[in-house]
Image (spheres, rainbow, N blue to C red):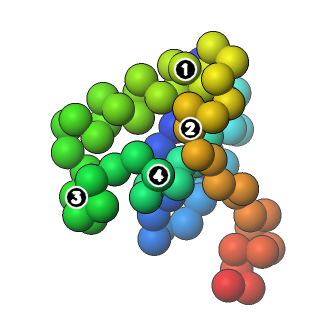
Amino acid sequence: MHSCYEAGPFGYGLHRDLVALGVRNLVSNRSAWTNNTGVTRQSDAKQLALRLDRYVAGNLHALATVRVPTPEEEQTH
């Protein structure tokens, strides 16, 4: 199973929980695909799902991902 969500101010706990359940999760750079208003619209969610589909199919340029820091790195920033 694959999933993705946009990076946000609440850390990466959700990412770590999904990975622990065996989900291949990606965290996306929000500004690379959203409307940049700070509000995720339904069309943004659809765009993210379509980009994830293309990424999983092999187009690594379809989704701008971010590196998830270790819990220790996250605590120091």
The quarter of the picture where the C terminus appears is: bottom right
Mark 3 in CB contact with mark 4 (< 8 angstroms): no
Q: Which residue is mark 2?
A: 63
Is disc 2 placed on a helix, strand or loop?
A: loop
Query: Is residue 47 shown left or right of residue 19?
Result: left
Q: Nearer the viewer, mark 3 or mark 2?
A: 2
Q: Which residue is mark 4?
A: 32
Front position in the image: 60 or 49: 60
Mark 1 in CB contact with mark 2 (< 8 angstroms): yes
Is disc 3 placed on a helix, strand or loop?
A: loop
Q: CA distance from mark 1 to mark 2?
A: 8 Å
| Residue 47 x/y as whole percent | 35, 32
Tell me what residue is drawn at x 69 percent, y 18 percent.
Answer: 58
Q: CA distance from mark 3 to mark 2?
A: 19 Å
Q: Quadrant of residue 63?
A: top right
Q: Which residue is mark 1?
A: 54
Please, is residue 58 above or below residue 26 in the view?
above
Residue 67 visible in the current orientation: yes
Q: CA distance from mark 1 to mark 3?
A: 24 Å
Q: Earlier in the sequence, mark 4 or mark 1?
A: 4
Tell me what residue is drawn at x 22 percent, y 35 percent.
Answer: 43
| Residue 3 x/y as whole percent | 53, 30
Front position in the image: 45 or 17: 45
Is disc 1 placed on a helix, strand or loop?
A: helix
Identify the amino acid type marked 1: Arg
Q: Earlier in the sequence, mark 3 or mark 4?
A: 4
Q: Nearer the viewer, mark 1 or mark 3?
A: 1
Identify the amino acid type marked 4: Ala
Mark 1 Cα shell of 10 Å, populated few (<14), some (14-19), many (≥20): some
